[in-house]
Amino acid sequence: MPKTVWLLIIGMLVNTTANSFLWPMNAIYMHQELGQTLSVAGLVLMANAAAGVVGNLLGGFLFDKIGGFKAIMIGIIITLIGLVLLTIWHGWPHYVWFLALIGFSGGIVFPSMYALIGVAWPEGGRRGFNAIYLSQNVGVAIGPALAGIVASHSFDYLFIANLVMYIVFFFIALFFKRIKSDDSYVQPNVMNESGAIKDRTSVYSLCILGFGFLLAWLVYSQWTTTISSYTQDLGISLTQYSLLWTVNGLLIVLGQPLINPIIKRMEGKFKSQIIIGLTIFIASFIVVSFAGTFKMFLVAIIIITFGEMFIWPIVPTIASILAPKGKDGFFQGLINSFAALGKMVGPFIGGVLADAYGMQVMFVLLIGFLVVAVIPFALYDLPLKRHQKLQKTES
């Protein structure tokens, strides 16, 4: 594994740990501390994710134009500015403005990190993206556990902790200067070299894949928004809710030996892995719809954890395979934008449905979204097949 990949893994760990001090608590903080409804909280998180969409597209563009190191540093510096301001002013409506700024700058960082994985270790395939995914979830295991303890004393300390961790991330990113990562790796893209698939066809396929990704994230985002507030209404403590994410992060790391044999048997069968993941997602939301105790929520998050292990690393892997030479940043930025769109509309849709019809109706509709997501995931390669068929006909 190249040094660049190891540095990205460590950087992603610190970055996610920093972010996870805040994101599981956003809806709870706005609902309980700032006195906003779930619908308003959903709108704020939608603005944060909308800014992330713009940031992802810009981050992918910057990666292709100026390189990964510069793009990542731009994102980090803007995030630090936002976190300093948020630490000082986190009342209403300042919270909205600075959260949107952080969403934008965070969006710049992520596609560059994912694109660097594909460029620096092309032969790694799914393994590189899975390594980044694992490091994210170690951060998810650490961050919320600490956040629950900190928040039980004061929410103010969460903002300080987030800022300190991001300063650490800034210094880790500086080490990129010592590793010639952006210019010394050239991705051998078989699809591009063969000339069998044009850029436009690849973009069409990526967009179809992205729509399924959007729906999956729309549903998954409820765990950090409507479901987080729902647990508080049921009398589940902040510490217990944070523990759910600690279990999620640890299980993703410790559960690898359980799913690796399945992944190896299904190597290259991306669609099958994704559909298995969606089926597990559905099972989780069936369980959570009946949950009324901490133990039931624990069972539900354990189930969905296995589902995400099948889906989340696969999608950026497919994006990397689809990316023509020199377009790695754009493709990772675009697919991350679909995820950000799901995170954008998810909290708002979930909040509106929960306020208007109650949690049970919301859960039923979320399961419906997951069923619909099967279609784009199953058909994403249709433009590629049509293009190949057309070429055979012409030849």
Image: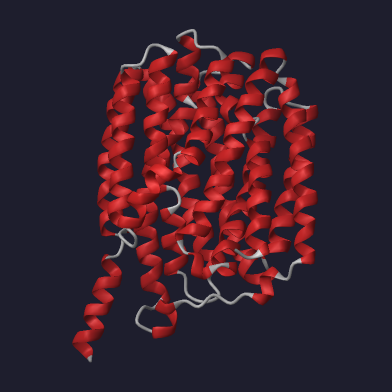
Residue 358, quarter of the rendered image: top left
Q: How is the image coloured?
A: secondary structure
Q: Position of residue 166 (x, y in %)?
A: 74, 41
Counting every numbered tag in the picture gives: 0
The residue depicted at 79 percent of the width and 42 percent of the height is 167
Q: Is residue 385 above or below residue 170?
A: below
Q: Position of residue 48 (x, y in %)?
A: 58, 39
In this view, the residue farthest toward the bottom is 395
Q: Position of residue 326 (x, y in %)?
A: 55, 75
Q: Nearer the viewer, residue 38 or 368?
A: 368
Quarter occupied by the C terminus = bottom left
Q: Position of residue 367 (x, y in %)?
A: 28, 33
Q: Nearer the viewer, residue 305 or 226?
A: 305
Residue 198, quarter of the rendered image: bottom left
The residue depicted at 72 percent of the width and 13 percent of the height is 153
The residue depicted at 61 percent of the width and 25 percent of the height is 145
Q: Is residue 104 above or below residue 234?
A: below
139 lies left or right of 277: right
Quarter occupied by the N terminus = bottom right
Residue 58 seen: no
Residue 202 seen: yes
The residue depicted at 64 percent of the width and 44 percent of the height is 13
373 lies left or right of 167: left
Q: Is residue 16 above or below residue 317?
A: above
Q: Nearer the viewer, residue 238 or 349?
A: 238
